Amino acid sequence: MSTSNNGWETVIGLEIHAQLSTNSKIFSGSATAYGAAPNSQANLVDLAYPGVLPVLNGEAVRMAVKFGLAIGAEIAPRSVFARKNYFYPDLPKGYQISQYELPIVAKGRMEIVLDDGSRKTIGITRAHLEEDAGKSLHEGLPRQSGIDLNRAGTPLIEIVSEPDMRSAKEAVAYLKKIHTLVRYLEICDGNMQEGSFRCDANVSVRKFGAEKFGTRAEIKNINSFRFVEKAINYEVERQIDVIEGGGKVVQETRLYDPDKGETRSMRSKEEANDYRYFPDPDLLPVEIDPAYIGEIKATLPELPDEKAARFVLAYDLSQYDATVLTSSKELGAYYDDVVKALAGEKLPSKEQAKLAANWVAGSLAAALNEHNLEITGSRIDAKRLAGLLGRIVDNTISGKIAKDVFEAMWAEDKSCDEIIEARGLRQITDTGAIEKAIDEVMAKNPGQLADYRSGKDKLFGFFVGQVMKATGGKANPAQLNELLKKKLAG
Amino acid sequence: MHTFTLAELAKKLRAKEFSVTELTRALLARVEASQPRLNAFITVTAESALAQAKAADRALADGKAGPLTGLPLAHKDIFCTSGVKTSCGSKMLDNFVSPYDATVVEKLNAAGMVTLGKTNMDEFAMGSSNETSWYGPVKNPWNPKLVPGGSSGGSAAAVAARVAPIATATDTGGSIRQPASLCGVTGIKPTYGRVSRFGMIAFASSLDQGGLISITAEDAAMVLGAMAGFDTRDSTSVDTPVPNYVAELDKPLTGLKIGLIKEFFDTGLDADVEKCIREALGVYEKLGATLVEVKLPALPLSVPTYYVVAPAECSSNLARFDGVRYGYRCQDPKDLMDLYKRSRGEGFGAEVKRRIMTGTYVLSAGYYDAYYLKAQRVRQLINQDFKRAFGEVDVLMGPTAPDVAFEIGAKSSDPIQMYLNDIYTIGANLAGVPAMSIPCGFVRDLPVGLQICGPHFAEAKLFNVAHAFQKETDWHRRLPADFAKEVLS
């Protein structure tokens, strides 16, 4: 358990809003695609015209159930939509359709791995379906506000955690796990810039050992992992300062300002809306039977934790590597494919699995990052990468040369063997050839040779470099080392 | 031709006694002439009516006509009609031209009916006298000093004065049956979920139901068949087949068990109205029915229950009228709050505001359990009362309203007195069961309505029972003297 200064303990709960990637809205037939011209994806239902009625999109229910099953939660046999009443221009009906007393998903959990490698379970109180609001636009409209209702009615699942997190790091770890999970389940694209995945953080502090929670502040709408960590840390310090300065933390809603790196008050509890929730009489309760749940269970993919556990068990990877390689479904699948192509029918050796892990998480990840690509857009597919790794394993090329081959493969659509042949990069493993190169280098550098022999051991590296240079980097490094030591010793 | 029922008109049009266009012209002239006296219409759609009439004449000539082709009707101004102002009786929507048709409108258009116009109503269907309309009160054709009832007062007055043979209407707490009773016409509120609410501007979603006001039960049976049915656009509409209501009209009533709701005869009922109702029940006995008294002990709680549930839902349903996207917007709003406050303050009338405030109050934190939740529990009890009663009898009967039509202005300053006008009708809305009102006599020269209520989806039974009475009596064929002539001066 992490501690803050002076014996203060931090308590955090998160409310995550994930937009469900349905084709149409939760209660209307409008499209949900991001970035369309303002109000081009808002029909009469979204605009709350007189007389229109909501009709539930079954796909949103299916996705919520999928999520519930993936976090080991209870799926409510009967859940109810309720109206949350408040006035705002981006809320056309004057109420948001949400779920209140009877949510579709309850009592789930998610395990996170802490810095010291230990595991911790975060409770998930509930997850409920609701509709998103529209957006108010202020830019380019002097003394006016515009409203874009394209987002109004986009399905959301709100995932409410227990106040189980004790540091900003834990909160980020939990948020990342949920982020990974919703993408695995293909129920949310996870795009934080576009607001498809965002969270509110409930933060309070208390003295260690205190039974009661401190008064909490809710930080609204944080849309990046980095900001979540910063906002929470700022808020924790602010609250400790308030209390240590003799003040009291007030229950309120706060906003995080990423430019200033601070949170500031939005509204206090007294100013908070009375939402006057009541069951929506326009919608029937959602009834879910066990057969439907069974059907969805059968479609669940291998989940990130299951996949990571398999990588540890079957491939002997470290927990760290396994976590990195399962951070997205596609990355995990890519790694799986590389290993399979490399090892064929057999289980890979620990070395093969590790080599593949290093390359996928290393050079490949760096190249993708540099070109701003997702794994699915990689210019080197799993088979081609496995071909390259195969040439390292069978000593055709060294790991160092492999990096050059990799770059060439990234640039042109050729197999590694073609590149190795065309550029003559095949590793020199012929002892005679290496010895010949060593002799030449020694002959060219009599001064250094004398120094080395008089005790300047450090010059060994100089000779390695010279021989590598002479062989175009192709000398087998292990052989070179061995032969060079012998020759220099005289 | 104005005195003909819809069924008679259908025959005469097919017999080529007159054309749809001739009929439509005659009725449009009556609509115009009646307006200063009744104020039954908010909008007259003469042009499109004549176009529909022309199309209907062609269909009749080509032998492509359906059973309702060319039959005229009026729509309550609560149903959205594409390209036509749909005001809901409110200043808030005085400038609102609907971009779409309600399902009911769409279906009746498709059936070939001719829409004469949109009828006046209490603002957002909130009222029992038609006095809350932004367009002024509708007058009772039997006496212009009196109210026609509400909220479907325009539809009831139009049918009573025979300016339209039938009109759509809606009923949240009695808004079809009470004006039908006060105007001497037939009204049916179907089972909740029988008729799609899509495009019907919501007052209280769990109670609102579209229906009809007509001259006869037979006419209503003809049109309800085309109007009812499951609608994918309304999740609360019920996916159960629509029977052929007309086919079941003439079943004999032998063995019919009629329950008299004891509580309806206990309090507040005018003695003459009671006598009139008892005489009507006598007609049913002659037709072979037996009368038994039934108790619905929770029913007297229906008015207070209704005045929690309905305002609660309306306070939320009417939140969309905010001056932002359509409807009334105040002049020069200072800021967002000013826009909201003045648009709503100026756009809504007093009764609507009263209900929004009541509804907001009963849903507020700290009051929800005491009011809304308790009302929902009482609603369950009322539901069970009806269920138990229908275990013992086939239909329930009683008065539709405690008295005949009252004077305009008599109750408008006393909301409680006004609300008590719906004391006999609200129960059916809370339980979701179908109910009718049919003319059954006159008291002090004013019509009295008999209420007939059946179990869920028993509309065919109600039409059958009402039709049997209308074959024996002619109360439903009586016309107010001022509207007796075909051409109104």
Image (cartoon, coloured by chain):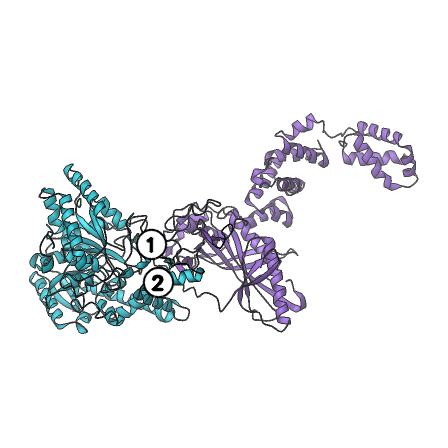
Q: Indicate the quadrant containing the C terminus of chain B: top left, top right, bottom left or bottom right.
A: bottom left
Q: Amino acid at mark 1?
A: Pro
Which one is nearer the viewer's eye here, B314 or A200? B314
Which one is nearer the viewer's eye here, A459 or B46? B46
Q: Secondary structure at mark 1?
A: loop
What chain does mark 2 sit on? B
Residue A219 visible to the viewer = yes
Q: Quadrant of residue B138?
A: bottom left
Instruction: Residue A214: give x, y in percent of width and height.
Output: 57, 69
On the rendered structure, is B38 left or right of A23? left
Q: Amino acid at mark 2?
A: Glu
Chain letter for cyan, please. Answer: B
Instruction: Residue A438: give x, y in percent of width and height.
Output: 84, 31
Mark 1 vs mark 2, CA separation in Å: 18 Å
Instruction: Tell which tag, 1 or 2, sits nearer the viewer.
Output: 2
Chain letter for purple, please. Answer: A
Q: Secondary structure at mark 2?
A: helix
Q: Which mark is residue A202?
A: none
Q: Which mark is residue A50?
A: 1
